[in-house]
């Protein structure tokens, strides 16, 4: 789902979109002819010509949308910097107030879908500041622009047709509906296809309105999160302390051990007990920074947004809203700046590692490569790149 463009000025985070269709969607060419073809496809799928006309008549290419799409910011903040920036006292206080104000709706969300209030509330805060900043792009123009553009038409054309269906249902006014530049709508920023599939009428008015109805947004988010694989009654993230002699190669995503195994290795919960469930040990800033056990439900966060730093922050924020203490920031080794990170990626690439694009971002491929190189150099293999590592290379 969405991006944190309103939370940090240089960040634009991954959108969760439908899988590409087998055949490439038509794109480009005369815009009015393109709209006529979209209308024909919508009618062929059973939608009314009237709803299609009401949606598409007057639609325009939005150059600002294309500009945003071409120049998305990259996520280069580290976990401590990002989490301190976005988990403010304001968001903590208002999150607690929102959970109290909508206690009945949150109780229904957990009863029906198994998703606890803090999990939904953290996403609600990070996406739109509890509905305060939902975007000001015309939704139909944004979707039509991106569907017509030939970069990712297979992702956005179905969303434009779904918007027509929402218009037919009376849940979208094509002239006044605004949202994010990539067409996401409402307080939890969802795309039209997902709203149609998972939308819930939380306030009983007969419509799904994620823009103005917090109750609708809460229940819809719960249904969506459940569909992503949320496990009822299980934890998602827990802060822990780690012994200095831990085998650091065992840390990172995809290296699960049961809670009892981690306990035998000297990993301890900072509060409460470690659940005896499979969990990865995450060290977002290396062995000297905060440490977390990420349980199976953490995978849902990665489905919501693929940025490791965003998802770890969102999951940690949810634990704070649920009563967990502020993390122990520790004293992590200094990381690398943008130019140094690119230099490191180039060196790793020259050594035969697949780090993806040399972009200065500490993504999963770069983390994996760093951990392997650290091991070969006899350094603590905690996947945190430092000036010392760069110097050795």
Image (tube, rainbow, N blue to C red):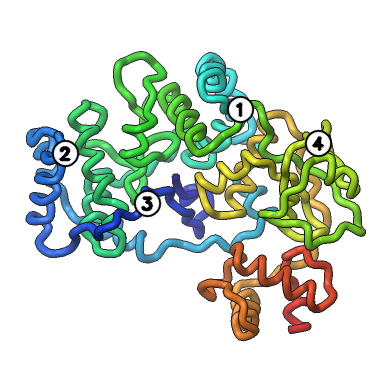
Query: Is 95 placed above or below 19 here?
Result: above
Q: Estimate how packed mark 1 is, as few (under 14), some (14 to 19) or many (20 or more) residues with alpha carbons within 10 Å.
A: some
Q: Image check: 4 left or right of 117? A: left
Secondary structure beneath label 3: loop
Q: How far is disc 1 from disc 3 in space, using C-alphas? A: 26 Å
Residue that mark 3 sits on:
19
Residue that mark 1 sits on:
232
Instruction: Give the quarter of the image for residue 119.
Output: top right
Q: Looking at the image, is mark 1 or mark 4 earlier in the sequence?
A: 1
> Is residue 138 in view?
no
Q: Estimate how packed mark 2 is, as few (under 14), some (14 to 19) or many (20 or more) residues with alpha carbons within 10 Å.
A: few
Residue that mark 2 sits on:
45
Q: Residue furthest front?
A: 22
Image point (65%, 26%), residue name: 233
Query: Is 144 placed above or below 377 here?
Result: above
Instruction: Give the quarter of the image for residue 168.
Output: top left
Q: Estimate how packed mark 4 is, as few (under 14), some (14 to 19) or many (20 or more) residues with alpha carbons within 10 Å.
A: many
Secondary structure beneath label 1: loop
């Amino acid at each position: 789902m969405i991006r944190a463009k309103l939370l940090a000025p240089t960040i634009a985070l991954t959108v969760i979109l439908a899988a590409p269709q087998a055949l490439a969607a038509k794109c480009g060419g005369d815009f009015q002819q393109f709209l006529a073809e979209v209308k024909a496809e919508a009618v062929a799928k059973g939608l009314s010509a009237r709803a299609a006309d009401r949606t598409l008549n007057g639609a325009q290419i939005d150059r600002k949308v294309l500009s945003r799409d071409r120049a998305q910011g990259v996520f280069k903040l580290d976990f401590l910097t990002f989490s301190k920036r976005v988990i403010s006292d304001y968001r903590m206080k208002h999150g607690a107030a929102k959970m109290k104000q909508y206690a009945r709706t949150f109780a229904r969300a957990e009863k029906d879908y198994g998703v606890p209030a803090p999990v939904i509330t953290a996403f609600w805060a990070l996406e739109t500041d509890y509905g305060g900043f939902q975007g000001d792009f015309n939704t139909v123009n944004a979707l039509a622009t991106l569907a017509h553009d030939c970069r990712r038409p297979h992702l956005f054309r179905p969303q434009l047709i779904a918007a027509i269906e929402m218009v037919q249902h009376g849940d979208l006014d094509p002239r006044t509906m605004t949202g994010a530049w990539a067409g996401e709508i409402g307080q939890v920023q969802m795309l039209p296809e997902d709203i149609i599939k998972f939308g819930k009428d939380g306030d009983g008015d007969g419509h799904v309105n994620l823009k103005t109805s917090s109750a609708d947004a809460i229940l819809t988010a719960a249904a969506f999160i459940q569909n992503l694989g949320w496990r009822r009654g299980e934890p998602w993230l827990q802060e822990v302390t780690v012994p200095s002699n831990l085998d650091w190669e065992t840390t990172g995503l995809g290296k699960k051990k049961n809670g009892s195994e981690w306990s035998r290795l000297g990993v301890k919960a900072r509060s409460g007990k470690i659940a005896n469930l499979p969990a990865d040990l995450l060290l977002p800033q290396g062995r000297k920074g905060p440490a977390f056990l990420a349980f199976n439900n953490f995978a849902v966060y990665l489905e919501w947004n693929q940025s490791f730093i965003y998802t770890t922050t969102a999951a940690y924020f949810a634990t704070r809203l649920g009563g967990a203490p502020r993390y122990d920031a520790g004293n992590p080794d200094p990381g690398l700046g943008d130019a140094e990170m690119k230099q490191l990626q180039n060196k790793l690439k020259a050594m035969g590692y697949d780090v993806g694009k040399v972009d200065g971002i500490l993504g999963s491929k770069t983390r994996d490569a760093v951990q392997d190189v650290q091991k070969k150099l006899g350094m603590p293999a905690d996947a945190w790149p430092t000036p010392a590592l760069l110097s050795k290379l």
